[in-house]
Amino acid sequence: MSFRLFDAPLREPSQFVGFAGNTIDRQSENRADDSVDKALADPATRLLLMHGGRLYLKLGDDGALDPWFGATESEPFKVSLAQGILLGFSERGPVLAVPAGVEPERLPETVKAIDYRSVYMQGLIDEAAAGAMAQGAALLAWHASHRFCSKCGTESQMRAGGYKRHCPNCGTEHFPRTDPVAIMLTATREKCLLGRGRHFAPGMYSALAGFIEPGETIEAAVRRETLEEAGIRLGRVVYHASQPWPFPYSLMIGCFGEPLNDDIQADLNELEDCRWFFRDEVRLMLERTHKDNLVTPPKGAIAHHLIRAWVDSE
Ligand SMILES: [Zn+2]
């Protein structure tokens, strides 16, 4: 009998999703309360500057956008270095994410503040920088919404280079959270189930998704969400790939589900439409050649990869 445990592709599907290109060495075992100060003393340190869900980008003469700032270079942008987070280390030195305080309309001509989603969707920075942006964006968002101890209400303090908050009153330690979201493509050999959320771009259909709840396995969440949103009961569920999703700090967990019934009962509070699509139609949606201009999500999205993997599975 062969050893089946690692019967998985050598090229992990998760390598190909957006935000997966993070090359930072986090060195999590070495994080200390003076990590940020030490990093800032290193002239090789590079900073990502973030403000209100936007990343600052330097506009070069050639039109290229550069997200990396030196510590001195960042000074005019009202940066809060004390609120900076040590993301880890690149080959060139330490990497920090730092909140900045200049409103987009007050920035010089040579610096743009662009929202994370556009930076990612438009591929404005390389994969490694996009991964670092996702890491920094998630952590800064968590700190911004967890300033006070949830046990006693006292203002807590950032520790461990930004990977912890400590309450000086009751001593509780608070750690950054990641919210797991199940995203699943229900499919048979012939057809797959796609839905349209009310906020989707025109013509776009995607895999169904929902938050995994406390006390639930990934598989149970996939089955529950599919039943609730589409009225489809699932048999087998298999994991395919995951994607960091910094809106504000989720992890998308992509799965395939095997349907046990055919009759869709869409939850129209959640979805505008939900229906079966045959393989040839989905291929046209991936290629952006569908006659009704129906499309799948863009390439960086994990839903795109689930759909692509299913279309190519035959
Ligand atoms: Zn407390």
Image: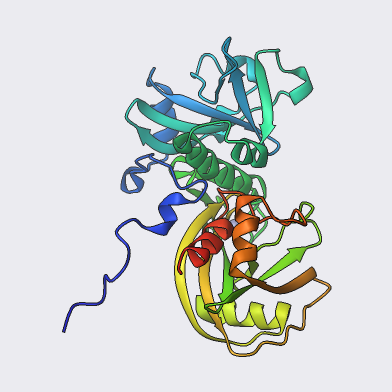
- Residue projecting furthest to the left: 1
Seen at 19% across and 77% down, the residue is: 3
Which residue sits at x=58%, y=71%?
185
Residue 313 locus on image (x, y percent): 45, 68
Q: Quadrant of residue 196?
A: bottom right
Is 54 above or below relative to 68? Answer: below
Q: Residue at x 69, y 55 (%)?
A: 295
Which of 206/169 is in front? 206
Within the displayed image, which quadrant is ligand 1 positioned in?
A: bottom right
Q: Nearer the viewer, residue 105 or 139?
A: 105
Percent position of residue 43, x then y: 39, 17
On the image, the x and y values in percent for residue 161 come to 45, 40
User: Closest to the observer: 77 or 91?
Assistant: 91
With respect to residue 222, does 161 lie above or below?
A: above
Name the colour scheme: rainbow
The answer to whether residue 151 shows anywhere in this view is no
Q: Residue furthest bottom?
A: 261
Q: Is residue 145 visible?
A: yes
Q: Is residue 2 left or right of residue 27?
A: left
Residue 53 point in image, percent of width and height: 68, 39
Q: Quadrant of residue 105?
A: top right
* Residue shown at 72% from the left, 77% from the top: 229
Left or right of 2, for residue 8: right
Q: How many marks?
A: 0
- Which image quadrant: the N terminus? bottom left
